[in-house]
Image (cartoon, grey):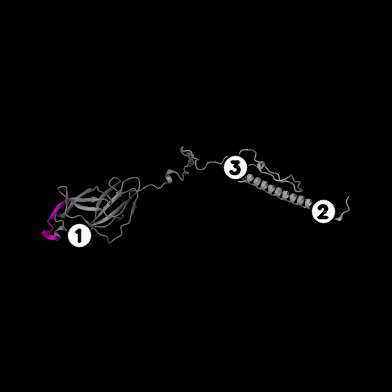
Amino acid sequence: MSSDPEELGARLRSHATRTSAGTGLAAGSLRRARAIQRRRTMIAAVAALAIIAGGVGGAGALGLFGGQPDDLPVAGPPVTSTEPAPSLTRPASDSPTPTPDLQNTTQDSGPPDTPPTATPPATTPPPNSGSPSDTPRRVDLCSLDNSEVRIDIGQGAAGHVEYFIVVTNASDQACTIHGFPGVSIESTSGGQLGAAAIYDRSVDDPAITVAPGESAKASLWLAQADAYGDECRAEPGAGFRIYPPEELDWVVIRMEVTGCANDDIALMQVRPFQPA
């Protein structure tokens, strides 16, 4: 070994220069290795997201970094690193998951499924609330079909005679009667003689239920035709024509009576039916 101080200094400087260059090269290689590791980690994360999202855009995400991880270039000599290299998880298939074409997807043009028809629940009939005898029966009107009509003579007054029109229930069921009877004098020729009786509304007109065999009566006042002189044109009649309330049919009660042929003179006034 030379003992020349200058030669020894030159050797030391040469060794330091080689050592510094080697250290710089090693540091640069380590930085590049770490950058490659970070890049591989990012590629693995993008691939995992592509698998989770159903493969949409997976192939494009890998293409952003220049292809498969094996194709990445590595510069410089191999460097041994003290840090563990990250593991890169590959998809189960080498080919990327196909992306569905959302624009070209068409729906089935067939008719929609027909919903099932619901079956209505069975209807349970309501229980019988009672026997037929418990149901109220409709009460018929007292009419010429179920009743008999007669005229009774009452007391007379100055210039007037009072009659009672009596309706008797001839059926085996109750009937009802309410209101005024229609009354006119029957002519001997079979028509109506003079004006019909007017209604006296000064008394109540109750609805009356007439039991079988029972009766209701209405008061009829008849003025004497002679009291009106020649204006009356008095004429004998064949009796009284009686219409029960709410009836279009009539019955003629034959008896001696005198009426006025002048329709402007009302000889009769009738009151509503009352219990007999």
* Residue 65, image x, y percentages: 62, 46
Relative to 207, say whether 135 is above or below: above
Mark 2 burial class by Cα count in 10 Å: few <14, some 14-19, many 20+: few
In which quadrant of the rendered view does residue 265 lie? bottom left
Q: Residue at x 23, y 51 (%)?
A: 242
Relative to 108, say whether 7 is above or below: below
Residue under pointer 1: 160
Look at the image and tell me in which quarter the C terminus lies.
bottom left
| Chain-order first, disc 2 or disc 3 | 2
Tell which of 31 and 63 is nearer to you: 31
Relative to 133, say whether 4 is above or below: below
Residue 54 visible to the viewer = no
Mark 2 or mark 1: which is in front?
A: 2
CA gap, disc 2 to disc 1?
Answer: 175 Å
Q: Is residue 139 left or right of residue 118?
A: left
Residue under pointer 3: 59
Mark 3 burial class by Cα count in 10 Å: few <14, some 14-19, many 20+: some
* Residue 88, image x, y percentages: 68, 43
What residue span does the magenta drawing correspond to?
Answer: 228-237
Residue under pointer 2: 10
Tell which of 222 and 92 is nearer to you: 92
Callout 2 amino acid: Ala
Q: Which mark is residue 9?
A: none
Q: Does the CB distance between marks 2 and 3 fall below 8 Å?
A: no
| Chain-order first, disc 1 or disc 3 | 3
| Chain-order first, disc 2 or disc 1 | 2
